[in-house]
Amino acid sequence: MKKIFITGSEGFIGSHLTEKLVKSGYNVRAYVQYNSFNSIGWLSNIDKKYQKKIDIVFGDIRDKENLENSMKDCDYVFHLAALIAIPYSYKSPASYIETNVVGTLNVIQSAQKNRIKKIIHTSTSEVYGTAQKIPINENHPLVGQSPYAASKIGADQVAISMSKSFGAPIVIVRPFNTFGPRQSLRAVIPTIISQFVLKKKDILIGNLNSSRDFNFVEDTCSGFICAMKSKFKSAEVFNLSSGKDFKILEITNLLKKISRYNPNIIVDKKRIRPKKSEVNRLIGSSRLARKYLNWEPKYINKKGFILSLSKTYEWFCDNIEIYNKNSNKYNL
């Protein structure tokens, strides 16, 4: 059975991907960011019978030597580790370059040393900036409207250059806004849902009119696995998107119906990005992923979005105390 190495395995998408691969019978080595809490993040939320099958190792993608040693005997690498919080990237842009760009180079070079069959590198729809044409395909211009987006563009270009220059076997998946259980409260949907769950009288939100192409985490993970199984390994880029966008205001109205709770919606200026940095609309085309990766998302159109939003709301209702007690452990 193939052995999988996953960076960022303890995070939101990484933990779901790890769980899905283990349940599918793969041997998984989970590379967890070293921390003083000895925490394995969201991997601790996985059913114990699957959790005990995961080979967990601690490290840091900025440490190339540790990466090389930890990656030995693996066949495939999923690279998800990254600094992702956009607001903090305005305060500490250098840390994003070091982790997201240099860290990506370390992962690729370590994979080459270990003769990995394929690296699945994680991009983000944020690299496109505000849509210049709809829907956004993989040829859309890349625009770094935040230090985070710039660092991810840099990471993508490192991956492409390493493939073209040295033959590194890479495929790049570019998920649009993924959401679901276990997501950080810094992300927009958990931010809103958590306030509904806690029955806040006033729900504080940023830009109500920005819209995003949201994907349920189950669909995003299936896209990653399709990329692994595909024949591609020359740094081809594939969008993982639903093809439909929703405004933040629409989401709050849907949550009023799902939760049967009707709070006040308040625009919090502190949550609004700098004017020139705001990405107003993202909606992607996943035609290439559907055609060449045989990826078929389950949660599509408005009906699918409402179903996945309801599942996410229910999970947060059952697990909100995890966030209250373990904000440091889960990097929230």
Image (spheres, helix red, strand yellow):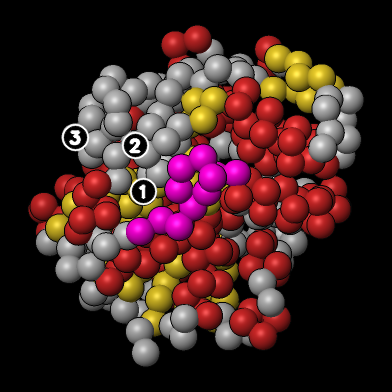
Q: Which element is circle 1 on?
A: strand
Whole-number angstrom distance, CA of label 3 to CA of label 1: 14 Å
Say above or below: 235 vs 260: below
Q: Nearer the viewer, residue 60 or 304?
A: 304
Say above or below: 147 vs 169: above
The mark nearer the N terminus, 2 or 1, is 1
**Mark 2 vs mark 3: in front:** 2
Residue highlighted by disc 3: 139
Q: Marks 2 and 1: CB-CB under 8 Å? A: yes
Looking at the rendered image, the quarter that the C terminus falls into is: top right
Q: Nearer the viewer, residue 155 or 251?
A: 251
Q: What amino acid type is highlighted by mark number 1?
A: Leu
Which corner quadrant of the image does residue 113 belong to?
bottom left
Q: What amino acid type is highlighted by mark number 2?
A: Gly
Q: Which element is circle 2 on?
A: loop
Disc assigned to residue 284: 2
Give the residue drawn at x 82%, y 37%: 260
Residue highlighted by disc 1: 240
Whole-number angstrom distance, CA of label 2 to CA of label 3: 11 Å
Q: Which residues are magenta?
A: 296-306
Whole-percent x, y for residue 200 in the image = 87, 30
Whole-percent x, y for residue 2 in the image = 35, 84
Q: Which element is circle 3 on?
A: loop
Which corner quadrant of the image does residue 262 belong to?
top right
Whole-percent x, y for residue 29 in the image = 48, 77
User: Would you say 15 lies left or right of 322 here?
Assistant: left
Q: What amino acid type is highlighted by mark number 3?
A: Asn
Q: Is residue 16 visible?
A: yes
Q: Nearer the viewer, residue 60 or 283?
A: 283
Give the residue drawn at x 20%, y 58%: 292
Give the residue drawn at x 50%, y 9%: 275
Q: Nearer the viewer, residue 230 or 254?
A: 254
